[in-house]
Amino acid sequence: MPRILGVDIPNDKHTVISLQYVYGIGPYLAGVLCQRTGIPPEKRARDLSEDELAKLASLLDNEYTVEGQLRRQLQQNIARLRDIGCYRGLRHRKGLPVRGQRTRTNARTRKGPRKTVAGKKGVKELR
């Protein structure tokens, strides 16, 4: 398996698809990278030479923010929002949806599993 920036990319897939396994590279950027390095997009990842891998790695390292550096940058942005105490930072801190979604229903991804609260006792149970 070829490694690019510490990520193993799959052998049996086309280069343009394999590059998308690196965090921060999508379909468009993968195509641009293949074009700029002169690698045919339909070439299998296992067939890439060391020279081609080195070209890709140096281009990604010098001109794009990907993988660990991108993750760190996103975490720093969220930490900044929390520190200044803005609305978005408070929503991050509370673990609620940040971008204006409703929370009365359909916020389970951000809120986590339901926490059941005991209901009121019925009239018959009071006696």
Image (tube, rainbow, N blue to C red):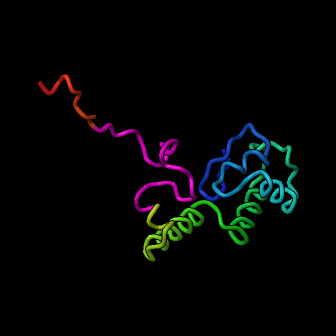
Quadrant for the C terminus in the image: top left
Q: Nearer the viewer, residue 121 or 31?
A: 121
Q: Position of residue 108 (x, y in %)?
A: 48, 42
- In terms of image quadrants, where is residue 11? top right
Q: Position of residue 91 (x, y in %)?
A: 46, 61
Q: Count the labels in the image.
A: 0
Left or right of residue 112, residue 101 in this image? right
Q: Nearer the viewer, residue 25 or 39?
A: 25
Q: Is residue 126 above or below residue 6?
A: above
Q: Is residue 81 above or below residue 1?
A: below
The residue at 49%/49% (across/down) is 103
In magenta segment, residue 103: yes
Q: Position of residue 124 (x, y in %)?
A: 19, 22
In magenta segment, residue 116: yes
The residue at 14%/27% (across/down) is 126
Q: Nearer the viewer, residue 55 or 33?
A: 33
> Which secondary structure type mostly characterizes the magenta part of the structure?
loop
Q: Position of residue 29 (x, y in %)?
A: 78, 58
The residue at 50%/45% (across/down) is 107
Q: Which residues are magenta?
A: 92-117
The residue at 66%/55% (across/down) is 4
Q: Is residue 98 above or below residue 83?
A: above
Q: Nearer the viewer, residue 113 or 20?
A: 113
| Residue situated furthest bottom in the rendering | 84
Left or right of residue 82, residue 69 in this image? right
Quadrant for the N terminus in the image: top right
Left or right of residue 9, residue 123 in this image? left
